[in-house]
Image: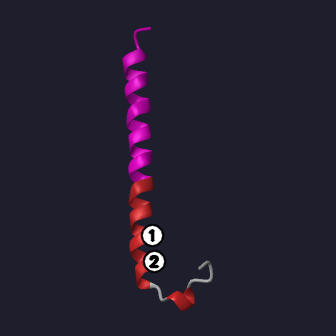
Amino acid sequence: MEDVGFIATSYVITFAALVALAVTTWRAGKQLSREVSDEDKPWT
């Protein structure tokens, strides 16, 4: 039980890094989608 703090901190840091990566990717995709014309978006 001595390492519970270290393990919990590691999980929090990992989760925060994954959330940051997801948000960064989402924002970049949103910005790039504005640069593509509607004719080149087959999903719309």
Above or below residue 5? Residue 39 is: below
Residue at (43%, 62%) from the top-left corner?
25
Residue labelled with disc 2: 33
- Foreground of the two, 30 or 18: 30
Q: Which residues are magenta?
A: 1-21
> Pointer 1 and pointer 2: residues touching (CB < 8 Å)?
yes
**Image x and y of residue 39, in percent:** 55, 91
Which residue shows up at 56% across the image and 83% down it? 41
- SS at mark 2 in the image: helix
| Amino acid type of the residue that numbered disc 1 sits on in the rendered structure | Gly
* Residue 29: mark: 1
For badge 2, the amino acid type reads: Ser
Q: Nearer the viewer, residue 4 or 44?
A: 44
39 w.r.t. 20: above or below: below
The residue shown at (52%, 87%) is 38
Q: Is residue 38 magenta?
A: no
Q: Nearer the viewer, residue 43 or 5?
A: 43
Residue drawn at x 41%, y 84% as measured from the top left: 35
